[in-house]
Image (tube, helix red, strand yellow):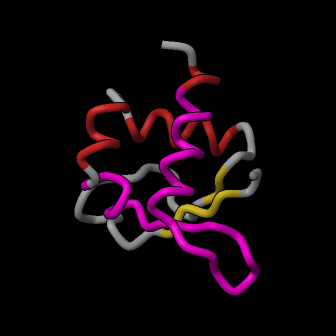
């Protein structure tokens, strides 16, 4: 699948599952995104899509690599609407 298309889908899912933070940016935790059934069906490699989106400055998150359980509370912030 096309990386650009997956990033577009990721943005849609973050909007669907997320909420606005203090700065007015939409954010969601990795655990919410990872455990969502719809996301599980869309993304074969959610972590890879997140990493590509971070590299393109579409999202931001603190961790270098996200792992289920360990990083469930890491906030993923949408930088581009």
Q: Residue furthest front?
A: 16
Residue 37: give x, y in percent of width and height. 23, 46
Relative depth, front residue between 63 and 33? 33
Q: Residue at x 59, y 34 (%)?
A: 7
Q: Quadrant of residue 76?
A: bottom right
Total labels: the figure holds: 0
Describe residue 61's horizontal placement relative to residue 48 as left or right: right
Q: Residue at x 35, y 64 (%)?
A: 71
Is 12 situated above or below 79?
A: above
Q: Residue at x 28, y 53 (%)?
A: 36
Confirm whether the magenta stretch covers residue 32: yes
Q: Residue furthest top?
A: 1
From the image, give the main secondary structure of the stretch colored magenta.
helix
Residue 67: give x, y in percent of width and height. 31, 53
- State the extent of the magenta-drawn residues as a range: 6-35
Describe residue 70's horizontal placement relative to residue 8 as left or right: left
Confirm whether the magenta stretch covers residue 4: no
Q: Quadrant of residue 72?
A: bottom left
Residue 57: give x, y in percent of width and height. 74, 46
Relative depth, front residue between 43 and 45? 43
Q: Residue at x 43, y 67 (%)?
A: 29
Is 48 situated above or below 63?
A: above
């Amino acid at each position: 699948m096309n990386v650009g298309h997956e990033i577009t889908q990721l943005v849609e899912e973050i909007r669907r599952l997320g909420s606005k933070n203090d700065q007015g940016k939409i954010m969601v935790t990795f655990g919410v995104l990872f455990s969502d059934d719809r996301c599980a069906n869309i993304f074969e490699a959610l972590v890879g899509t997140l990493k590509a989106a971070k590299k393109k400055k579409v999202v931001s998150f603190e961790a270098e690599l996200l792992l289920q359980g360990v990083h469930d509370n890491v906030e993923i912030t949408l930088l581009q609407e």
